Amino acid sequence: MMTFARPLFLVGLVTVILAGASAVQAATHRFVAMAGGEKVGHLLAEVDGATTRVDFAIDNNGRGPKARETIIVDRAGVPIQVDIEGSSLFGSPVQERFSRTGNRAQWVSQADKGETDVTGTPLYVPNDGSPWILGQYVKALLKAPGWSLPALPSGTMRLKEVRKFTLGDGPRAIYLTVYELAGVDLTPSYVLVDQRGDLFGILGGGLIREGYEGHLDTLNALAREIDLAQAKAAQTKLAHRFNTPVRIRNVRVFDPLTQSLGELSTVVVFGDRITSVQPEAQDPAAPAPEGQVVIDGQGGTLMAGLHDMHSHTSLDSNLFYLAAGVTATRDQGNDNARLLQISEGLEKGELAGPRIVRNGFLEGRSSYSARNGFIAETLEEGMEHIRWYAERGYWQIKIYNSMNPDWVGPLAAEARRLGMGVTGHVPAFSNPDRVLFDGYDDIAHINQLMLGWILSPGEDTRTPLRLTGMARAANLDLTTEQVRSTVRYMSENGKALDTTAMILERLMLSRSGQVHPADAPYYDHVPVAYQRFRKRTFVTLDADPGQTDAAYQAAFGKVLEVLKLLDDNNVQLLPGTDDGTGFSVHRELEVYVMAGISPGKTLRLATLDAERYFGRDHELGSIARGKLADLILVEGDPTTNISDIRKVRMTMVGGVAYFPAEIYEHLNVRPFAAPPPVTPAR
């Protein structure tokens, strides 16, 4: 899994416990970072007067940030100097510095550098570091009018009290408050502080004060409760339900079979089904039949909803997906309890989001294990986990990096016996041909396929090598029998590839201080912290002679060639992102077109072909009478300009309509397209 919907303990933040600096006594604050119930890192903050030194490290799934930070605060507890050294998620070096002298502030980070005059008490948002500064923000905002303060480099922080409660019993009981901190990143942070106002942890983010790890289940349950309450309120606010037919007029319908748009048409939806698809009336201005809601598509494209075939569901990602026109996702690994809870809420109509196909995450035990789903210590444990997934209606199992290659065949056979499919990474020290032969239906990530043609036996893909090794693809010869035999086997045996090509583009080609073309279309629509997160390097250039900028550029060109090679050989491509913002789904489709796949074919892959893979194309994937009303209205014609897919004006899931402009405003993102005109029933 290469997810970049960042866990809260990776948010890139750091600082000190405060009060008047002269009154602060020396103190040490210790925290542990947890994932899947296991310790994956630590945070140690040593406070001495106005200075705090922080040691922060995460090691999860073979990666994680490392940072040593020094922070100096003024008498109000606001940071006036921040120094950070270390490494980011995949090991690229970090050197960040912020200072404020009088009314002048300066900063330099991996993403940017700047200098500006300031007034009042703006709060600097570091680009790399630890979550310690979140507690500082809470203290500063509680003293501010309206619990709001400006942020540096830009933006506004806002604070809201969510819950007060007591954790534990007896002498160890501690009184805590949950605050929602918003306006900095794409999603809010939920910060736990104790009765003294000191940081206790990040709710749902895996960071907790040392010694209280035994309460993590209680805190995770509280996080789910708060998240669900917020999500249910959002669904009530954003969902548009109709008890009459909905007449969507003046649209051109995308036909995935012909890969083209038809003439102007009217599509009628009643309940959760499409009930009519007819040519537009001679007089488009003629009144609609009584008792029908009318939505004017204004000549735009009406098509089946998009798919993300590699997601990691969250309540936040559900809203981002709807705003992007995604009506179905394949969840490729999650916290099992959380995913089942979300699925239940969607099925009951209490939550807004796309339809979810659940895959069960299954990892092997090693020092590199990902803490998601289940970790199997033995083959029999793996079998039991598969049965657990089957009994709860999961569609496939997903096998991960640390699984014993010799167990893949038996695990796949057990999944098949129970009516499930198999997907996943290529486990370390195995190869794509072997896992396909052992029973995989598809391989997750194009790099997991290509590394089998690049790496030498014995190289360990549980480490960041599964990314950095892709630089060697610059010299990959796609005409070799090794490459051709794998492609031929996939084609002849109906094996697919879950591509996530856009995440490879991001990881391989993002550079410090630069906005990559993939991110430019939405960059100035999103909050400052996410903007800065996108202006960073994930790989370490020149770590060895082959890892240069030119090598990565050439290697990504080879990724595009592989996409085209697979498509030309009728290997089904499953457009996926491993991200969750929705913006990335649009980029995945743009990458397909960059590879030489036509826009029309790309749209078919993202709609009807994805549903064929799920075996649901009789109900979904195209617009036709009797099918479920999962559809989107797009401004423009994405069959000629694939980037028009970014301009979604309406998303409908089972006849319930959402207007992306309203969702984005709710998420503090500037919208990309206006809602269509809606006329109530008369």
Image (spheres, rainbow, N blue to C red):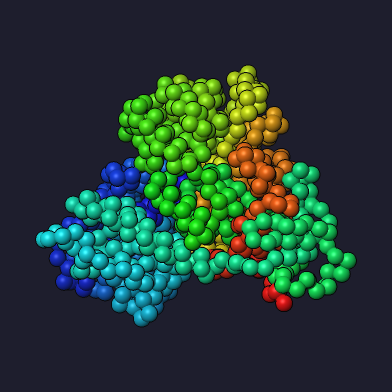
Instruction: Tell me if residue 322 comes above or below residue 665 in the rendering.
Output: above
Q: Position of residue 213 (x, y in %)?
A: 23, 50
Between residues 219 and 69, which one lies in front from this camera angle?
219
Instruction: Tell me if residue 433 comes above or below residue 189 in the rendering.
Output: above
Instruction: Tell me if residue 574 comes above or below residue 626 in the rendering.
Output: above
Instruction: Tell me if residue 415 comes above or below residue 115 in the rendering.
Output: above
The quarter of the image holding the C terminus is: bottom right
Between residues 22 and 195, which one lies in front from this camera angle?
195
Residue beneath the point at 49% across and 44% down: 358
Farthest residue, direction bottom? 145
Q: Is residue 623 left or right of residue 60?
A: right
Residue beneath the point at 32% across and 30% down: 377
Q: Position of residue 384 (x, y in %)?
A: 37, 32
Q: Is residue 192 left or right of residue 516?
A: left
Q: Is residue 488 left or right of residue 105?
A: right
Q: Position of residue 221 (x, y in %)?
A: 32, 56
